[in-house]
Image: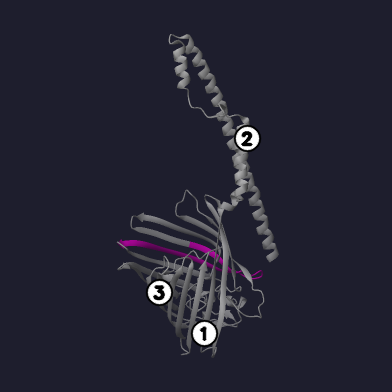
Amino acid sequence: MRKLFLCVVIAVFCGEYARGEQSVEDRLARLEALLQAQQEQIQTQQAEIESLKKELKSSQGGQDDVERADQEDLQLPVQDGAAIGQREIDEMVDKALAEREKDGTPEWLERIKLKGDFRFRHEHIDDEVADRDRDRTRLRFRIGADAKVNDEVDVGFRLASGSDAPTSTNQSFDNSFTSKDFFLDRAYVDYHPAALEGVNIYGGKMPNPYYFPGNSDLMFDTDVNPEGAALTVKNTLADNTEMFGSAGVFYVEERPEDAESSLWAAQAGMKRELFADTSLTAGLGYFDYGNAKGFQAFESSYTGSRLGNTLVNDRYDMDYDIFQMFGQLGWDAGGVPMVVFADYMKNTDATVSGDTAYLFGTGLGKRSKPGTWDVFYNYRRIESDAVIAAFTDANFGGGRTGSKGHKVNFNYQVSKNWVFATTYIWGDFVGSGKDYRDLYFDMKFKF
Protein backbone atom coordinates (compact mmCIF):
# COMPACT_ATOMS: atom_id res chain seq x y z
CA MET A 1 0.00 0.00 0.00
CA ARG A 2 2.85 2.38 0.83
CA LYS A 3 4.54 1.60 -2.51
CA LEU A 4 1.29 2.37 -4.31
CA PHE A 5 0.98 5.67 -2.43
CA LEU A 6 4.54 6.66 -3.37
CA CYS A 7 3.90 5.79 -7.02
CA VAL A 8 0.81 7.99 -7.04
CA VAL A 9 2.73 10.89 -5.48
CA ILE A 10 5.55 10.55 -8.03
CA ALA A 11 3.09 10.39 -10.92
CA VAL A 12 1.28 13.52 -9.74
CA PHE A 13 4.54 15.43 -9.30
CA CYS A 14 5.79 14.39 -12.74
CA GLY A 15 2.53 15.50 -14.31
CA GLU A 16 2.71 18.82 -12.52
CA TYR A 17 6.32 19.30 -13.71
CA ALA A 18 5.31 18.73 -17.33
CA ARG A 19 2.47 21.20 -17.04
CA GLY A 20 4.77 23.70 -15.32
CA GLU A 21 7.35 23.52 -18.14
CA GLN A 22 4.61 23.92 -20.73
CA SER A 23 3.44 27.03 -18.86
CA VAL A 24 6.93 28.57 -19.17
CA GLU A 25 7.05 27.84 -22.92
CA ASP A 26 3.60 29.35 -23.37
CA ARG A 27 4.61 32.56 -21.64
CA LEU A 28 7.78 32.87 -23.71
CA ALA A 29 5.78 32.31 -26.89
CA ARG A 30 3.40 35.07 -25.88
CA LEU A 31 6.37 37.36 -25.16
CA GLU A 32 7.83 36.69 -28.60
CA ALA A 33 4.49 37.39 -30.28
CA LEU A 34 4.12 40.64 -28.31
CA LEU A 35 7.59 41.84 -29.29
CA GLN A 36 6.94 40.94 -32.92
CA ALA A 37 3.72 42.99 -32.87
CA GLN A 38 5.58 45.92 -31.36
CA GLN A 39 8.25 45.65 -34.08
CA GLU A 40 5.58 45.82 -36.78
CA GLN A 41 4.06 48.88 -35.11
CA ILE A 42 7.48 50.56 -34.98
CA GLN A 43 8.05 49.95 -38.69
CA THR A 44 4.65 51.49 -39.48
CA GLN A 45 5.46 54.55 -37.39
CA GLN A 46 8.85 54.93 -39.10
CA ALA A 47 7.16 54.91 -42.51
CA GLU A 48 4.71 57.59 -41.37
CA ILE A 49 7.58 59.76 -40.10
CA GLU A 50 9.41 59.50 -43.44
CA SER A 51 6.22 60.52 -45.23
CA LEU A 52 5.84 63.56 -42.95
CA LYS A 53 9.43 64.58 -43.62
CA LYS A 54 8.80 64.59 -47.38
CA GLU A 55 5.67 66.71 -46.93
CA LEU A 56 7.55 69.20 -44.77
CA LYS A 57 10.37 69.45 -47.31
CA SER A 58 7.96 70.49 -50.04
CA SER A 59 6.03 72.92 -47.82
CA GLN A 60 6.75 76.58 -47.11
CA GLY A 61 9.06 75.80 -44.20
CA GLY A 62 11.60 74.16 -46.50
CA GLN A 63 14.73 72.44 -45.28
CA ASP A 64 14.72 74.12 -41.84
CA ASP A 65 11.46 72.40 -40.91
CA VAL A 66 12.87 69.07 -42.04
CA GLU A 67 15.95 69.50 -39.87
CA ARG A 68 13.77 70.54 -36.92
CA ALA A 69 11.60 67.47 -37.46
CA ASP A 70 14.73 65.30 -37.44
CA GLN A 71 15.81 66.85 -34.14
CA GLU A 72 12.39 66.34 -32.54
CA ASP A 73 11.93 62.82 -33.90
CA LEU A 74 10.07 60.34 -31.74
CA GLN A 75 12.18 58.27 -29.34
CA LEU A 76 11.27 54.86 -30.70
CA PRO A 77 12.81 51.66 -29.36
CA VAL A 78 16.07 51.17 -31.27
CA GLN A 79 19.14 49.05 -30.99
CA ASP A 80 22.42 50.08 -32.71
CA GLY A 81 20.60 52.87 -34.55
CA ALA A 82 17.82 50.69 -35.95
CA ALA A 83 14.47 49.37 -34.80
CA ILE A 84 14.60 46.05 -32.94
CA GLY A 85 14.68 43.21 -35.41
CA GLN A 86 13.87 39.49 -35.29
CA ARG A 87 17.40 38.65 -34.18
CA GLU A 88 17.12 40.94 -31.15
CA ILE A 89 13.70 39.50 -30.29
CA ASP A 90 15.15 35.97 -30.40
CA GLU A 91 18.00 37.06 -28.15
CA MET A 92 15.58 38.53 -25.58
CA VAL A 93 13.54 35.32 -25.53
CA ASP A 94 16.68 33.17 -25.22
CA LYS A 95 17.89 35.34 -22.35
CA ALA A 96 14.58 35.00 -20.49
CA LEU A 97 14.65 31.22 -20.96
CA ALA A 98 18.27 31.02 -19.80
CA GLU A 99 17.46 33.00 -16.65
CA ARG A 100 14.55 30.65 -15.96
CA GLU A 101 16.77 27.59 -16.35
CA LYS A 102 19.44 29.20 -14.20
CA ASP A 103 16.93 29.79 -11.45
CA GLY A 104 16.03 26.10 -11.64
CA THR A 105 12.56 26.53 -10.09
CA PRO A 106 9.68 25.10 -12.15
CA GLU A 107 6.54 27.21 -12.10
CA TRP A 108 4.49 24.45 -10.44
CA LEU A 109 6.94 24.28 -7.53
CA GLU A 110 6.32 27.95 -6.73
CA ARG A 111 2.71 27.01 -5.93
CA ILE A 112 3.74 24.52 -3.23
CA LYS A 113 4.60 25.48 0.34
CA LEU A 114 6.45 22.88 2.41
CA LYS A 115 6.18 22.93 6.20
CA GLY A 116 6.96 20.71 9.14
CA ASP A 117 7.84 20.41 12.81
CA PHE A 118 9.90 18.29 15.18
CA ARG A 119 9.27 17.75 18.90
CA PHE A 120 11.58 16.08 21.44
CA ARG A 121 9.85 15.01 24.67
CA HIS A 122 10.75 13.41 27.97
CA GLU A 123 7.84 12.21 30.11
CA HIS A 124 7.27 10.82 33.60
CA ILE A 125 3.95 9.09 34.39
CA ASP A 126 2.64 7.98 37.78
CA ASP A 127 -0.48 5.89 37.08
CA GLU A 128 -2.02 4.12 40.09
CA VAL A 129 -4.31 2.13 37.80
CA ALA A 130 -1.27 0.64 36.06
CA ASP A 131 0.34 0.38 39.53
CA ARG A 132 3.75 1.61 38.36
CA ASP A 133 5.72 4.70 37.36
CA ARG A 134 6.96 5.11 33.84
CA ASP A 135 9.65 7.23 32.17
CA ARG A 136 9.93 7.50 28.42
CA THR A 137 11.52 9.69 25.75
CA ARG A 138 9.61 10.35 22.56
CA LEU A 139 9.73 12.26 19.32
CA ARG A 140 7.18 13.67 16.94
CA PHE A 141 8.06 14.52 13.36
CA ARG A 142 5.58 15.87 10.83
CA ILE A 143 6.13 17.15 7.32
CA GLY A 144 3.60 18.27 4.75
CA ALA A 145 2.74 20.71 2.02
CA ASP A 146 -0.02 23.00 0.81
CA ALA A 147 -0.38 23.22 -2.97
CA LYS A 148 -2.29 25.91 -4.83
CA VAL A 149 -4.15 24.20 -7.68
CA ASN A 150 -5.77 27.45 -8.78
CA ASP A 151 -7.27 30.56 -7.19
CA GLU A 152 -10.18 28.54 -5.74
CA VAL A 153 -8.67 25.14 -4.92
CA ASP A 154 -5.85 24.06 -2.59
CA VAL A 155 -4.65 20.57 -1.76
CA GLY A 156 -2.82 19.73 1.47
CA PHE A 157 -1.14 16.68 2.91
CA ARG A 158 0.96 15.75 5.93
CA LEU A 159 2.98 12.72 6.98
CA ALA A 160 3.60 12.02 10.66
CA SER A 161 5.52 9.71 12.95
CA GLY A 162 3.89 7.49 15.56
CA SER A 163 1.39 4.66 15.32
CA ASP A 164 -2.01 4.30 13.69
CA ALA A 165 -3.72 5.61 16.87
CA PRO A 166 -5.81 8.68 15.92
CA THR A 167 -4.86 10.58 19.09
CA SER A 168 -1.06 10.52 18.92
CA THR A 169 1.81 11.09 16.53
CA ASN A 170 4.41 10.40 19.24
CA GLN A 171 7.06 7.75 18.68
CA SER A 172 8.75 6.29 21.77
CA PHE A 173 12.45 5.45 21.75
CA ASP A 174 12.38 1.65 21.97
CA ASN A 175 12.68 -1.63 20.03
CA SER A 176 16.48 -1.70 19.82
CA PHE A 177 17.05 1.22 17.43
CA THR A 178 14.66 -0.14 14.83
CA SER A 179 13.36 2.12 12.07
CA LYS A 180 10.16 3.97 12.92
CA ASP A 181 6.86 4.11 11.08
CA PHE A 182 5.58 7.06 9.06
CA PHE A 183 1.87 7.50 8.33
CA LEU A 184 -0.43 9.59 6.16
CA ASP A 185 -1.76 12.06 8.73
CA ARG A 186 -3.65 14.41 6.39
CA ALA A 187 -4.66 14.48 2.72
CA TYR A 188 -7.47 16.78 1.68
CA VAL A 189 -8.80 19.29 -0.83
CA ASP A 190 -9.97 22.79 0.16
CA TYR A 191 -12.40 24.45 -2.26
CA HIS A 192 -13.06 28.13 -1.51
CA PRO A 193 -15.17 29.57 -4.35
CA ALA A 194 -14.49 33.22 -5.15
CA ALA A 195 -18.22 33.84 -5.55
CA LEU A 196 -18.88 32.73 -1.95
CA GLU A 197 -16.52 34.66 0.28
CA GLY A 198 -15.88 32.98 3.63
CA VAL A 199 -17.01 29.53 2.44
CA ASN A 200 -14.65 26.54 2.46
CA ILE A 201 -15.53 23.00 1.38
CA TYR A 202 -13.19 20.21 2.48
CA GLY A 203 -12.90 16.60 1.44
CA GLY A 204 -10.46 13.91 2.61
CA LYS A 205 -8.54 13.40 5.84
CA MET A 206 -8.58 16.97 7.07
CA PRO A 207 -7.74 19.27 9.99
CA ASN A 208 -10.57 19.35 12.51
CA PRO A 209 -13.05 21.94 11.11
CA TYR A 210 -14.77 22.65 14.45
CA TYR A 211 -14.08 25.34 17.05
CA PHE A 212 -13.10 24.40 20.60
CA PRO A 213 -12.43 27.16 23.19
CA GLY A 214 -9.00 27.27 24.77
CA ASN A 215 -8.02 24.35 22.51
CA SER A 216 -10.36 22.15 24.53
CA ASP A 217 -9.66 18.47 23.91
CA LEU A 218 -12.62 17.02 25.80
CA MET A 219 -14.08 15.50 22.64
CA PHE A 220 -11.12 15.35 20.27
CA ASP A 221 -7.41 15.15 20.96
CA THR A 222 -5.61 17.85 18.96
CA ASP A 223 -4.01 15.09 16.84
CA VAL A 224 -7.37 13.80 15.54
CA ASN A 225 -7.88 14.49 11.81
CA PRO A 226 -11.38 13.34 10.78
CA GLU A 227 -12.08 11.69 7.41
CA GLY A 228 -15.01 12.73 5.24
CA ALA A 229 -16.44 16.02 3.96
CA ALA A 230 -17.10 19.34 5.68
CA LEU A 231 -18.36 22.85 5.02
CA THR A 232 -17.21 25.89 7.00
CA VAL A 233 -18.62 29.42 6.80
CA LYS A 234 -17.47 32.76 8.19
CA ASN A 235 -19.51 35.91 7.68
CA THR A 236 -18.97 39.40 9.07
CA LEU A 237 -22.35 40.84 10.06
CA ALA A 238 -21.04 44.20 11.26
CA ASP A 239 -17.76 45.87 12.08
CA ASN A 240 -17.67 44.11 15.45
CA THR A 241 -19.52 40.82 14.86
CA GLU A 242 -18.58 37.64 13.00
CA MET A 243 -20.73 34.53 12.59
CA PHE A 244 -19.15 31.14 11.92
CA GLY A 245 -20.39 27.61 11.40
CA SER A 246 -19.29 24.12 10.39
CA ALA A 247 -21.12 21.02 9.23
CA GLY A 248 -19.75 17.68 8.13
CA VAL A 249 -20.17 13.96 7.72
CA PHE A 250 -17.28 11.68 8.64
CA TYR A 251 -16.70 7.95 8.27
CA VAL A 252 -15.44 6.27 11.44
CA GLU A 253 -15.66 2.55 10.60
CA GLU A 254 -16.52 0.96 7.26
CA ARG A 255 -17.75 -2.64 7.51
CA PRO A 256 -18.12 -4.68 4.29
CA GLU A 257 -20.83 -6.93 5.73
CA ASP A 258 -22.47 -4.62 8.26
CA ALA A 259 -23.58 -1.03 8.76
CA GLU A 260 -20.85 1.58 8.86
CA SER A 261 -20.28 3.89 11.82
CA SER A 262 -20.26 7.58 11.03
CA LEU A 263 -20.25 11.01 12.65
CA TRP A 264 -22.67 13.75 11.60
CA ALA A 265 -21.78 17.06 13.22
CA ALA A 266 -22.84 20.71 13.07
CA GLN A 267 -21.72 23.75 15.00
CA ALA A 268 -22.56 27.47 14.96
CA GLY A 269 -21.11 30.39 16.87
CA MET A 270 -20.50 34.11 17.05
CA LYS A 271 -17.49 36.27 17.86
CA ARG A 272 -18.24 39.82 18.97
CA GLU A 273 -15.88 42.68 19.80
CA LEU A 274 -17.43 44.10 22.96
CA PHE A 275 -15.07 47.06 23.16
CA ALA A 276 -11.39 47.83 22.59
CA ASP A 277 -9.21 44.72 23.05
CA THR A 278 -12.13 42.64 24.40
CA SER A 279 -13.98 39.92 22.49
CA LEU A 280 -16.55 37.25 23.31
CA THR A 281 -16.97 33.97 21.41
CA ALA A 282 -19.91 31.64 22.09
CA GLY A 283 -21.79 28.87 20.32
CA LEU A 284 -23.49 25.48 20.19
CA GLY A 285 -22.72 22.15 18.58
CA TYR A 286 -24.23 18.72 18.02
CA PHE A 287 -22.20 15.57 17.28
CA ASP A 288 -24.18 12.46 16.33
CA TYR A 289 -22.37 9.12 16.04
CA GLY A 290 -24.38 6.77 13.87
CA ASN A 291 -24.25 3.01 14.51
CA ALA A 292 -22.22 2.99 17.71
CA LYS A 293 -24.50 0.95 19.98
CA GLY A 294 -23.96 -2.78 19.54
CA PHE A 295 -20.80 -2.33 17.47
CA GLN A 296 -17.21 -2.94 18.46
CA ALA A 297 -15.50 -0.09 20.32
CA PHE A 298 -13.49 2.12 17.98
CA GLU A 299 -10.29 1.88 20.01
CA SER A 300 -10.20 -1.90 19.55
CA SER A 301 -8.70 -1.35 16.09
CA TYR A 302 -5.49 0.13 17.53
CA THR A 303 -5.35 -0.86 21.22
CA GLY A 304 -6.45 -3.88 23.17
CA SER A 305 -7.29 -1.93 26.32
CA ARG A 306 -10.60 -0.38 27.29
CA LEU A 307 -10.61 3.39 27.63
CA GLY A 308 -13.62 4.00 29.89
CA ASN A 309 -16.82 3.79 27.83
CA THR A 310 -19.46 1.27 28.93
CA LEU A 311 -18.96 -1.87 26.84
CA VAL A 312 -20.64 -5.27 26.65
CA ASN A 313 -18.42 -7.91 25.06
CA ASP A 314 -16.19 -5.08 23.75
CA ARG A 315 -19.21 -3.46 22.06
CA TYR A 316 -20.76 -0.11 22.90
CA ASP A 317 -23.75 -0.38 25.21
CA MET A 318 -25.28 2.90 23.98
CA ASP A 319 -25.19 5.49 21.24
CA TYR A 320 -23.35 8.80 21.50
CA ASP A 321 -25.31 11.88 20.44
CA ILE A 322 -23.46 14.77 22.06
CA PHE A 323 -24.74 18.29 22.67
CA GLN A 324 -22.12 21.04 23.14
CA MET A 325 -22.08 24.60 24.53
CA PHE A 326 -18.94 26.73 24.61
CA GLY A 327 -17.71 30.24 25.37
CA GLN A 328 -14.49 32.23 25.44
CA LEU A 329 -13.74 35.77 26.63
CA GLY A 330 -10.46 37.45 25.74
CA TRP A 331 -9.08 40.86 26.69
CA ASP A 332 -5.90 42.87 27.16
CA ALA A 333 -4.74 42.98 30.80
CA GLY A 334 -2.23 45.81 31.04
CA GLY A 335 -0.61 44.91 27.74
CA VAL A 336 -0.75 41.15 28.36
CA PRO A 337 -3.41 39.07 26.52
CA MET A 338 -5.70 37.09 28.83
CA VAL A 339 -8.50 34.63 28.17
CA VAL A 340 -11.07 32.58 30.09
CA PHE A 341 -12.99 29.74 28.46
CA ALA A 342 -15.44 26.91 29.07
CA ASP A 343 -16.63 23.84 27.16
CA TYR A 344 -19.66 21.71 28.14
CA MET A 345 -20.86 18.43 26.62
CA LYS A 346 -23.68 15.99 27.33
CA ASN A 347 -24.43 12.64 25.70
CA THR A 348 -28.18 12.90 25.16
CA ASP A 349 -28.45 9.19 24.33
CA ALA A 350 -26.63 7.84 27.38
CA THR A 351 -28.29 5.09 29.39
CA VAL A 352 -26.09 5.65 32.46
CA SER A 353 -25.56 8.60 34.79
CA GLY A 354 -22.03 9.28 33.52
CA ASP A 355 -23.19 11.36 30.57
CA THR A 356 -21.54 14.78 31.13
CA ALA A 357 -18.17 16.38 30.47
CA TYR A 358 -17.00 19.91 31.12
CA LEU A 359 -13.82 21.95 31.07
CA PHE A 360 -13.04 25.50 32.16
CA GLY A 361 -9.80 27.40 32.32
CA THR A 362 -7.74 30.51 31.73
CA GLY A 363 -4.70 31.62 29.77
CA LEU A 364 -2.20 34.46 30.07
CA GLY A 365 0.39 35.83 27.64
CA LYS A 366 1.15 35.30 23.97
CA ARG A 367 4.26 34.02 22.23
CA SER A 368 5.24 36.33 19.38
CA LYS A 369 9.03 36.75 19.50
CA PRO A 370 12.03 35.36 21.44
CA GLY A 371 11.66 35.91 25.17
CA THR A 372 7.85 35.90 25.17
CA TRP A 373 5.70 33.24 26.83
CA ASP A 374 2.20 31.99 27.58
CA VAL A 375 0.65 29.81 30.26
CA PHE A 376 -2.67 27.93 30.31
CA TYR A 377 -4.62 26.12 33.02
CA ASN A 378 -7.82 24.09 32.90
CA TYR A 379 -9.89 21.84 35.13
CA ARG A 380 -11.99 19.09 33.58
CA ARG A 381 -14.33 16.26 34.46
CA ILE A 382 -15.11 13.62 31.85
CA GLU A 383 -17.69 11.07 32.93
CA SER A 384 -17.58 7.56 31.53
CA ASP A 385 -19.93 7.94 28.56
CA ALA A 386 -20.00 11.69 27.93
CA VAL A 387 -17.81 11.36 24.82
CA ILE A 388 -16.20 8.62 22.72
CA ALA A 389 -13.10 7.62 24.70
CA ALA A 390 -11.17 6.64 21.56
CA PHE A 391 -10.83 10.30 20.51
CA THR A 392 -10.44 12.29 23.76
CA ASP A 393 -7.13 13.77 24.98
CA ALA A 394 -4.57 10.95 24.99
CA ASN A 395 -2.50 12.49 27.81
CA PHE A 396 -5.16 13.29 30.39
CA GLY A 397 -5.79 10.15 32.44
CA GLY A 398 -4.00 8.09 29.83
CA GLY A 399 -6.76 8.81 27.32
CA ARG A 400 -9.51 7.38 29.53
CA THR A 401 -12.94 8.80 30.29
CA GLY A 402 -14.22 8.61 33.87
CA SER A 403 -11.46 11.00 34.97
CA LYS A 404 -11.15 14.48 36.47
CA GLY A 405 -8.39 16.87 37.42
CA HIS A 406 -6.09 19.69 36.40
CA LYS A 407 -3.76 20.50 33.52
CA VAL A 408 -1.26 23.37 33.33
CA ASN A 409 0.94 24.17 30.33
CA PHE A 410 3.79 26.71 30.01
CA ASN A 411 5.46 27.73 26.73
CA TYR A 412 8.56 29.91 26.26
CA GLN A 413 9.78 31.22 22.90
CA VAL A 414 13.53 30.48 22.92
CA SER A 415 14.16 31.88 19.45
CA LYS A 416 12.43 32.06 16.11
CA ASN A 417 10.56 28.77 15.45
CA TRP A 418 11.93 27.22 18.67
CA VAL A 419 9.76 26.75 21.79
CA PHE A 420 10.42 25.15 25.17
CA ALA A 421 7.29 23.81 26.90
CA THR A 422 6.35 21.90 30.00
CA THR A 423 3.00 20.36 30.98
CA TYR A 424 1.78 18.88 34.25
CA ILE A 425 -1.42 16.85 34.68
CA TRP A 426 -2.76 15.69 38.02
CA GLY A 427 -6.12 14.12 38.81
CA ASP A 428 -7.92 10.90 39.62
CA PHE A 429 -10.39 8.44 38.19
CA VAL A 430 -14.04 9.00 39.12
CA GLY A 431 -15.28 6.44 41.65
CA SER A 432 -11.98 4.60 42.14
CA GLY A 433 -9.98 7.22 44.01
CA LYS A 434 -6.83 6.19 42.12
CA ASP A 435 -4.57 9.04 41.05
CA TYR A 436 -2.90 9.89 37.75
CA ARG A 437 0.15 12.15 37.32
CA ASP A 438 1.88 13.10 34.07
CA LEU A 439 4.81 15.51 33.70
CA TYR A 440 6.52 16.15 30.37
CA PHE A 441 9.05 18.55 28.88
CA ASP A 442 9.13 19.48 25.20
CA MET A 443 11.54 21.14 22.79
CA LYS A 444 9.55 22.12 19.68
CA PHE A 445 10.91 23.29 16.34
CA LYS A 446 9.04 24.45 13.24
CA PHE A 447 10.28 24.86 9.70
Q: Is residue 217 above or below residue 97?
A: below
Residue 414's x, y, as percent? Answer: 45, 70
Q: On the picture, is 260 further left or further right than 267?
A: right
Q: Which residue is mark 3?
A: 375
- Residue 128 painted magenta: no
Q: Which residue is mark 2?
A: 90
Q: Position of residue 383 (x, y in %)?
A: 46, 81
Residue that carries the numbered disc 1 in the rendered image? 125
Q: Secondary structure at mark 1?
A: strand
Which x, y percent locates residue 428? 46, 86
Distance in Å between CA atoms under marks 3 and 1: 21 Å
- Residue 38, image quadrant: top right
- Magenta region, residue range: 247-275
Of residues 282 and 90, the one nearer the viewer is 90
Amino acid at circle 1: Ile
Q: Residue 242 is drawn in which quadrant?
A: bottom left
Q: Position of residue 156 (x, y in %)?
A: 56, 59
> Residues under labels 1 and 2: Cα distance?
71 Å
Asked if the residues shown at circle 3 and circle 1 are in contact, with their CB atoms under 8 angstroms apart, the answer is no
Q: Secondary structure at mark 3?
A: strand
Q: Quadrant of the N terminus?
A: bottom right
CA separation in Å, label 2 and label 3? 63 Å
Total numbered labels: 3
How many other residues sit within 10 Å of disc 1, few (<14), some (14-19) or many (≥20)? some
